[in-house]
Image (tube, rainbow, N blue to C red):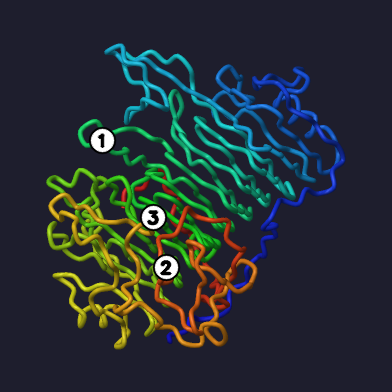
Amino acid sequence: MFMLKAPLVLRALFVSTAMSVVPVSAATFDVTKGDWGDSSTINSFAWAINQANATPGSDSIRLFSDVSVDRADPVEPISGFLAELTDRAGVTIQGNGHSLVGNPVFIDNNGNIINKNFPRKYSPMGGDQLMTEAVSFARISDQVSNVLIDRLNVDGLNAFLDVGKGSEATIVDSTIKNAVAFGRMARSVINAQSESTVNLTRVVLNKLNPFSNSSFGTEFIWETPAIVGIDATLNIVKSKFELATTSSTAGAVDWLGGTANVVSSVILGQGLSIADYTKEGVLNLVNSVVRPAGGTATARIQAWAGGVANVIASTLQFDAFESTIPNREFCPQMYPCNGAPLQVFDNGEIRLQSSAVSVLNEDFTGISYPYLAAYDTQAGTPLAGIFAADLYSYVQPVANQNAVSLRLLFGQPNLITASGAYLLDPSSNPLVATYYDLPNGAYPNPSGPLVGVIPDADTLNQLINPIDGSVISTDVFGSPRTYNNRRDVGAVQQIASVPGPLPLLGFGSAFGWSRRLRRRLGERPSPPRGRQR
């Protein structure tokens, strides 16, 4: 088993598995109005935030109604944010299952009404008439100790939170969906500034910037990652990203410096990107699934500019068919769809530990090198990175990268490369790239190379959560994580029946190793805006 360079100091995240713990509050403000309102509209959301900002101590805001933002006036007209949370003691927003709802609308030059339910792949253009602009929820000022958002659903806004320097935001049991940018520039749903911490537990992100591609009926790949941060900390637990096709290669999370932990989560249709900035960048993907959805080319892990991605007990699937059809319509501009599902360049590192990586439909598309350690940039200069793997990891050979070449690429002579890693639907037609997505039909083959591989799984090789150090006892879909003291390769444990929806898993735990944090001198790359890698 390979070893990383040194333990990584990780910040613990405290969230109850049964219900959120509400801190002692200086005051409680109730929201009963159905419109956003303003600071003078008693019992409106705008009023409650204004009162909480003006009242010392950690206050609570409770929603007893859905709230529409369509007629709201942003406190920052240019950026479109409706509120700023300024009390350094923090605030708890108890959504009680209610929704913050917007429906930005424009009429195109053909008279079609465009909104979140009938989207297009562009915001208003010349000749279009904007009827209702998109707005964003809130900025969190610098050094706010904690903002807790519990059971608040968000539907049809632009951005959700901008987390200020040194602040902390925790979102629990919430859904954010249908993010659009009509009338304003697209921005990430959550943006974390330096030294901030963002915690997501049991959060669903669904259809972010859902602009339809009329030619193929799939979502347009927007250029803004769903969650982006610079020199910050991100903890994602038991969460799910559904068809959040928000960027070129980064997709779900784009992290520049600091630590991003993604644990016991499902990432559909997009990927995760890590790079160094003024701090070393480390991504820890643990007990999670990254797989294709909706015809996108972004279901991948990307490490670049010195960033390190530790992929632990996770499953990555990449559908080559969806990414290499004629003219590569599903590939971002200047991106050849090689280096997928793993892409590493410019001194980045991807390290596999007891993980499974596969490429589906490769034989029918002619994809060249899905595991690529040197990316040919727009300037034409290959920038090399490093692959590594332990002897318990599986990587599927493809036509241009056989078992011998993969073992050399990953520096692991015992890398598992045997065929038959998954049971797929035998009746599927490969010409239309039909296959069962995880978890509804692709499981470790009981006679294949993934089942029962990791020994001492309940003792020496326990699966540990990087956030709080607890033991992960279930797989990503809620099945027991070990059987007879052995664990399967990847995030899916062999079971006898098809599991149900993603459950509220126990708050799992992490590995205690990673690359030693290095001091970075000199100028780092500028934060990308719509990076086309």
Is residue 52 found left or right of 297 in the rendered image? right
Sort mark 1 into few (<14), some (14-19) or many (20+) by Cα contacts within 10 Å.
few
Q: Nearer the viewer, mark 3 or mark 2?
A: 2
Residue 17 in the image: state x and y as whole percent: 67, 58
* Residue 231 seen in the figure: no
Residue 427 in the image: state x and y as whole percent: 18, 57
Tell me, yes or no, whether the two marked residues, 3 and 2, touch with CB atoms within 8 Å: no
The residue under label 2 is 492
Residue that protrudes farthest toward the front in the picture: 497
Q: Which mark is residue 271?
A: 3
* Residue 208 seen in the figure: yes
Q: Answer with mark 3 or mark 2, whichever residue precedes in sequence.
A: 3
Q: Amino acid at mark 1?
A: Gly
Q: On screen, 217 above or below 166? A: above
Q: Which mark is residue 217?
A: 1
Q: Which mark is residue 138?
A: none
Quadrant of the rendered structure where residue 333 is? top left
Residue 317 or residue 141, whichever sits in front? 317
Q: CA distance from mark 1 to mark 3?
A: 21 Å
Quadrant of the rendered structure where residue 470 is? bottom right
Q: Amino acid at mark 2?
A: Val
